[in-house]
Amino acid sequence: MEHVFVYTRKRREFGRPCHFSDRPAELIVDILPDAGLRAEFVERNPLPAQVQCGPEWSEHEVNTERLESEARGMNHVEGGWPKDINPLDMEQTMRYRKKVEKDEHYRSAIVRLGSIMEHYIKQNNAVDIYQEYFTEGQEEDDEEEEQEQPVARTISVFRDPGAVKRWVTALSWSPAGGCKLAAAYSCLDFQRAPPNMSYDSYIWDLENHSRPEMSLKPASPLVCLEYNPKDSHILLGGGYNGQIAYWDTRKGSHPVETSPIEVSHREPVYKVIWLQSKTGTEAFSGSTDGQVLWWDIRKLSEPTEKLVLDLSRKGDLGHALGCLSLEFETTMPTKFMVGTKQGLVVSCNRKAKTPAEKIVCTYSGHNGSIYALQRNPFFPKYFLTVAGWTARIWSEDVKESSIMSTRVHLLDGCWSPVRPSVFFTVKMDGTLDVWDFLFNQKDPTLSLKVCDEALWSLRVQDNGHFLACGSQQGTTTLLEISSGLCTLQRNEKALASEMFERETKGAKILEEQQREIRLKERSRSEQSKEEERKESEKVERAKELLERAERHFFHMVEGGRMLLNKNGSDHLGVQVL
C-alpha cells in the first residue's frame, strides 16, 4: 500500500510565466577603445598569472650540479669630471657646470633621459588595479589564522665547503636585521680529528647559500662563536685549545687579537657570552676545565676575573665542575648560571665579596651533561635546561626538582623570543621539535625531520620567524616557521604566567612532602641509633660486670693459693725442730 501526499499551489503564486523564444543577438552598448586612456596605465612585465585548472604533469627529480654564485659590490663616488677639474673645488665645478649647461647636446640628453627616468618612476609607483585592499570576513580570516596548523619549511641549506665535514658546534645571528648567520665548525671527537681538517669557520649571507660571505681563520677550530649585540662587525669565539679570539670583519679574516695560551682555558671553550656594558667590549667564557673567565677584548692578554666551579668553595681545579653552557640575562647584571658536565646547574653572583660567596646554589635533576641553558625571555625567573635524555623547565624557587620535563634524546634547545610558552629542541635522529606547553606538555606541537644525521646546534632569529639548525655533518639548515608559532597569541602571557605559578606551587608542595619524609626517616634513624646505643651500653655493662667477677674470682683463687703455701711451710719447720 503506497502513501501519497499531494502538494497543491495556486497558479498565481508561481509568478510571471517565462516565455522563451529564439532570436538573434542584440547589441545593447558598444564601448570603443580610447587610446588616450592607455597613457595612464603602466605595462607590467613580467605579469604573474594564476589559473584554476591546468594540465596534469608527471613529477621527476634530478640532482643538478651545485652552482656557486658570488656577490660583488661597487662603491660609486662622484665622477665624470675631466682630469684637470678638482671635484672638491667648488669654483672649478661651478664654472664647468655652467659651461656644460650651455651645450645643446646636454639639453637633448637631459630630455631623453628624463622621459626614461619618469617611466621607471611611474612603474615603481604603479598601483595594481586588481589588488583587493578590503577582504570580506576579515574576522573569520583572523580566526582561521589562529587555528592554522603549525608548520615549518626549509628555506636554504648551507654546507661546509671543506673536504672534511665537521660539526656545526655553534650558530649566531647578526644583530643587523638577522640577514647574516655565523657558524662555528669543529670536531669534538677527542684525538680523532683528521690531519687535513680545516680550522675555518664561516659567515653566511641568507641570500647566497652556495658560498660563504666570509671565512674566519682561527688558530684552533672554534667551538663557540657570538656576534656582538652592539656592533655587527665584531665576533667573539672560543677555540678547541681553550683560547679566546675576536674578529672585526672590516679588518679581514684573521683575528684581531687572541688570548695567550698560558692564561686561557685548559680545555675547549663551549660558550662565550657578551656582557651588558657601556663599552660593549666585555664578555665571559666557560670551559670543561672548571673555570669561568671574564675578558675585555681591548686587552686579551689576561682575563679580568676568574671563578673556579668548586662546590667546596676551596678553588681547587681538581674538584671543579666542567662547564658546557652559560646563561646571562641583561636584566640581572650580577647573576649568571652555569650548566655543568655533571648534570648540575650552578647559580652564581658575580659581585660577591669573596670567591666562595660567588657560588650561590645548585639545581640537581639531570643525569647527564647539560648542553643548553636559557632563561625565559618573558619570565626570567624560569629557565630551560637540555640534557642527555630530557628537557626541563625550572623555577628559581624550587631547587630540588623541575616544574616541567620531556622525555626525548636531545642535544640542544632554546626559547622562542616572541612567545613565552614555546621552545625548540633538536634530537640525535635529526628531528626538530617545537613545544607549546599551553597546548601539550607531553608531546611536541610540531616534529620535523630536518636531516638524517644528528642535529648539534640550534638558534632562533630575534623576530622568531627563522630558525637555523646545525648538524654533525657540517650542514646548516635554515627553516621558516609558520606565523602561528612566531606570533604572540591572545592572553598568552597571562596563561603562561598562571601555568608557571601553578606548576611551581605543585613542585613546592612535593618538595615539602619529600622534606617531611626525610625528616621522619632521619628521626627514625636517630631513634634506632639511640636504641642501638642503649643496647650496646647494656652489652658493655654486662661485659664489664663479667670481667669484674672474673678478676675477683681469680684474685680469690690466687689469695687461697698463697695462704695454702704459707701453712705448708710452717708445718715443715716444726717437724724439723
Image: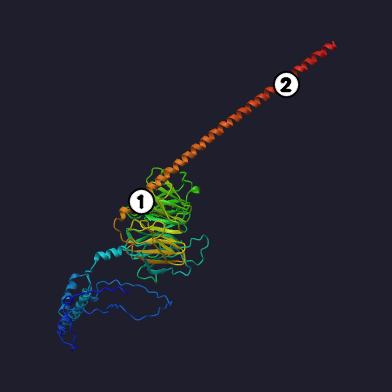
Visible in this render: residue 276? no
Looking at the rendering, which quadrant does residue 154 occupy? bottom left
Give 103 or 567, whichever is nearer the viewer.
567
Q: Residue at x 33, y 63 (%)?
A: 465
Residue extending farthest to the bottom is 24
Visible in this render: residue 345? yes
Instruction: Name the mark nearer the viewer: 2 or 1.
Output: 1
Q: Which mark is residue 558?
A: 2
Q: The N terminus appears in which quarter of the rendering?
A: bottom left
Instruction: Say which element carries label 2.
Output: helix
Give the residue type at disc 2: Glu
| Residue 543 picture location, percent across and down | 63, 28
Residue extending farthest to the right is 576
Q: To which residue does mark 1 refer?
A: 500
| Residue 499 picture location, percent across and down | 35, 52
Q: Is residue 552 above or below residue 62?
A: above
Give 248 or 151, whichever is nearer the viewer.
151
Residue extending farthest to the front is 1
Give the residue type at disc 1: Phe
Q: Is residue 120 left or right of residue 223?
A: left
Q: The C terminus appears in which quarter of the rendering?
A: top right
Looking at the rendering, which quadrant does residue 405 occupy? bottom left
Determine crowd level at label 1: few under 14, some 14-19, many 20+ residues with C-alpha closer than 10 A.
many
| Residue 368 picture location, percent across and down | 48, 54
The Cα atoms of the two marked residues, 2 and 1, are separated by 84 Å
